[in-house]
Image: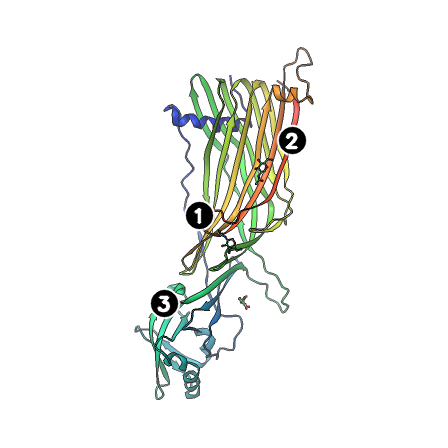
Amino acid sequence: MFVKSAASAGLLLALTNFASASPVLMKKDAATPAVANKILLTPAAPASGDGSNLALASQDSFIWTHDDQGIQANMTLQASKNFRLLSAPNFQDVVQSVDCSTEDITIKFGSASSLQAAQAAWKWVNQAASNTIIYVADDEACAGDKGRQPFSVESITYDTTANTALFAATKAAWRDFAEDASIRISGVPATGNTARDIGKDVSIDIGHDFSQPIYSTTIDGVNLAIACSNCKTQGTLNADITLSLSNGFEASLTTSGNLGATVEVSVTAGGSISSPLSTNIPIATVPLAGFSIADVVDIGPQLTIVADASISGFSASATATVGATASLPDGSGFTLGQGANIQPTIQATGLSLSGEVSVSAQVAPVFTLQLAATFLGEGLVGGLALQAPVLKADFAGQATSAGTAQCGANTGIAEVGVEVDVSAELDVFGGFGGATDQPNKTSLFNKSTTLWKACLVV
Ligand SMILES: *[C@@H]1O[C@H](CO)[C@@H](O)[C@H](O)[C@H]1NC(C)=O
Ligand SMILES: *[C@@H]1O[C@H](CO)[C@@H](O)[C@H](O)[C@H]1NC(C)=O
Ligand SMILES: *[C@@H]1O[C@H](CO)[C@@H](O)[C@H](O)[C@H]1NC(C)=O
């Protein structure tokens, strides 16, 4: 005899508990994550600037883009005391050539007056031993294939005959001279004259189908198979992300494509289990396409799916299917770490039962999107955890005693009372930490409803 039940998802999971106790059962491991593609952003020239600005700055912005993806990253960096920033594109129009073939850097100016202007603008570096210029090169000869490289310049000597400035330079790492820094990763602003033009955001597609048989075994005379017959996540998160050394991971997100999850579980069993079981099953770990800027930032989004399941003791001979979809209305917007007013939609996707079963089962899948990042070597993390649809099904006795469905009243027809409750909870988090941390966790909604309460003819 076989029981097939969505509620049984819980069953299946519950049974994995047995796996550790019994060598007969195989433990289901989460799939080994594959390596997802990384979107590499490359340096872009500053949007504004006259190309002849020789001034040293204690704060500057650096842009990287990926045109195909329409993504832009804008890092704003405040230099530590004793450091000043000098970005090559800012004065490229007065430079004839840059020679990086030796460790020192030679800059040849186009005119004697430009050299004089540079001498005046850069005299600060020679005024004290601790004064250091950070020269940020973004041509290939100096910066290599990373495309942008800071150099620490301790002193500068000038040759007025050759019109050159010689930088005593060594390669530097951004973190070494950053007092504070933040990087905003967002859609490229639409080109246009008005400041009100809004570009699209960074899109993170969370769609993944993980329908699969989860478990199959025979334990103590009970045949049990559990399958996710229709299990998937869907939709896109549109993100505007800011990583900051002082504030951690911040992002505002909007949803599209009916963001949510469908879980339809079927459990097939024949036999009986006398005591309740509960367990936690890792179902999948799915790496999603991330973003990377050499030496600056690395974001590796990952979707993990685990399910908590429990099932009462049961004695079964029936076939049942239970499932639900929980989704967010398109355009739902929220900011990590802050509350929001979002009402999820919950719909039944399938419910059927044949035969007889007396069982109470719960399956609670948790979909966690973790955006783990390193920014200038610091670990930052943000994301969201959707616990939905949590399916709790009571077959037989419970629905009857609840009074709404008086099952068995029709003599000659076998009926089973069923009550299916679903709930959905969405938490968001963002701050400092590693891939498994959930700093500043906030609950956006926590909704529970009875999806189904009826007598089923079996
Ligand atoms: C980059 O950020 C800085 C600081 O917020 C801002 O002034 C600048 O306009 C931004 N640049 C672009 C191209 O968005
Ligand atoms: C929580 O967020 C704030 C910024 O909004 C940040 O300063 C703080 O460090 C975060 N907490 C953790 C544990 O990451
Ligand atoms: C959500 O609600 C359920 C019961 O309805 C409760 O057990 C759970 O703790 C709640 N979660 C939060 C974060 O409040």
The quarter of the picture where residue 105 lies is bottom left
Counting other residues with Cα less than 10 Å from the Cα at mark 1, is it few (<14), some (14-19), or many (20 or more)?
A: some
Give the numbered dot on residue 450: 2
Mark toward the start of the polypeptide (2 vs 3):
3
Q: Which residue is more in the foreground, 375 or 38? A: 375
As shown in the figure, which amino acid type bears the numbered disc 2?
Answer: Thr
Q: Which residue is more in the foreground, 375 or 440? A: 440
- Up the image or down, 29 lies above or below 79; here it is above
Q: Ligand 3 appears in which quadrant?
A: top right
Counting other residues with Cα less than 10 Å from the Cα at mark 3, is it few (<14), some (14-19), or many (20 or more)?
A: some
| Count of numbered marks | 3
Q: Are marks 1 and 3 in contact (CB under 8 Å)?
A: no
As shown in the figure, which amino acid type bears the numbered disc 3?
Answer: Ala
Residue at 48 percent of width and 20 percent of height? 275
In space, the residues marked 2 and 3 are separated at their CA atoms by 60 Å
Q: Position of residue 352 (x, y in %)?
A: 60, 24
As shown in the figure, which amino acid type bears the numbered disc 1?
Answer: Ala
Give the numbered dot on residue 172: 3
In space, the residues marked 1 and 3 are separated at their CA atoms by 28 Å
Which residue was labeled with disc 1?
A: 435
- Camera sees residue 121: yes
